[in-house]
Amino acid sequence: MKVLFYIQSMAGGGAARLLALIANELAQRNHDIVVATNTEFNISYDLVSQIKIVSLYRSDSYTGIRFTRMINLIKDARRIAKQETPDVIVTMLPPVSFSVKLATMGLRIPTIFADVTSYARNDSRFVHFVRYHFYRLADAVTIQTENDRKILGNRLPNKVVINNPLSYPILNKECEREKTILSIGHTKEWNIKGFDLLIDAFSLVADSHSEWNINIAGGNTPETLQMLKDRIKEKDLEGRIEFIGFQRHIDQLMRKASIFALPSRIEGFSLSLTEALSQGCPAVAFKIKGVITDVTDNGHGTLLAEDYSVKQFANNLDLLMSNEALRKQKSIEGRTFVKKYEIGNIVSQWEALFSKLTKNE
């Protein structure tokens, strides 16, 4: 089967990471895979050699009148679809889904909108329109959790829950770990990622655990990085919390850290959480309006705190830092639980969806 993926950029982010995982596994199962994206940017995630990459954007795509840029995108997306003649199209993220669907109308190619963001978050007017209304034009919309299905209710009858797959094989051995807490996210999304909450929570227990430190992996902007560093200084935690930048091989950090912290206010699925559990790193997280309760099935491998309760989050950090036996117990529990998210299981669900849509043509 030939599958054509459209995505704005493969330079980084959860959507690009998800696409790379699914596309690589499909290619290894002998499907014909094409990825249309911005080839001016670096591709941050490895794609197997069988995957064809085509340019979705012109060299002047980020200059000129906005309306003209959109028209050019629609023209190019349609040209690519007609040239590649895929059996199925998969689009990533609302703006691209909107443009590609307009571009491919009348081509009679089944289209799947892959949504990778929680429906609990507040969207711009345009994105809200696309996600809650325009998505009805797709043959299927993939969402990431049962919690999102509950939020949507009767909206989008074409929705299908397909969880995020693991990026790495599940660790099958114990390894030496540092007294480090790992958290992941770009500083420009500090409010969504809850880095302020993590700093505040750690400040409540740091004095009792002087040998423990926090590493925050992910990109940054100078303004948001400085704002967070100022907060760290205010809490007298300088030298205890470090921003270590984007890490290509995050699995290696997950195998070194003793605890994974997910202080997010909003999450769609949290691939970083399930990946940390797969590498034997027990976690502390907020329930995030039921999303993480759902993803971990009530806390497998994870100590859950009520949303925004900095004190409870701090207490859970304290429990894990203080108790090596509990960390080992949660490590084993987490690795066993996340087998359901292994790439083979998830991609089989995608294949079943492709087969269903192509049979209905």
Image (tube, rainbow, N blue to C red):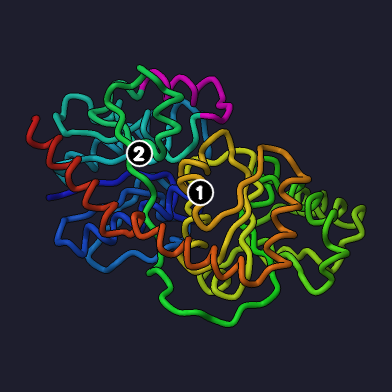
Residue 167 lies in the magenta stretch? no
Secondary structure character of the magenta stretch overall: helix
* Pointer 2 local density, CA inside 10 Å: few below 14, some 14–19, many at least 20: many
* Pointer 1 local density, CA inside 10 Å: few below 14, some 14–19, many at least 20: many
Q: Looking at the image, which residue is at 48% across and 67% down?
A: 332
Residue 208, position as x, y percentages in the image: 85, 65
User: The C terminus appears in which quarter of the rendering?
Assistant: top left
Instruction: Name the residue carrying label 1.
Output: 270
Instruction: Name the residue carrying label 2.
Output: 114
Q: Which residues are magenta?
A: 120-134
Amino acid at dot 2? Ala
Q: Is residue 248 at least partly visible in the picture? A: no
Q: Looking at the image, which residue is at 26% across and 31% down?
A: 140
Q: CA distance from mark 1 to mark 2?
A: 15 Å
Residue 321, position as x, y percentages in the image: 71, 66
Amino acid at dot 1? Ser
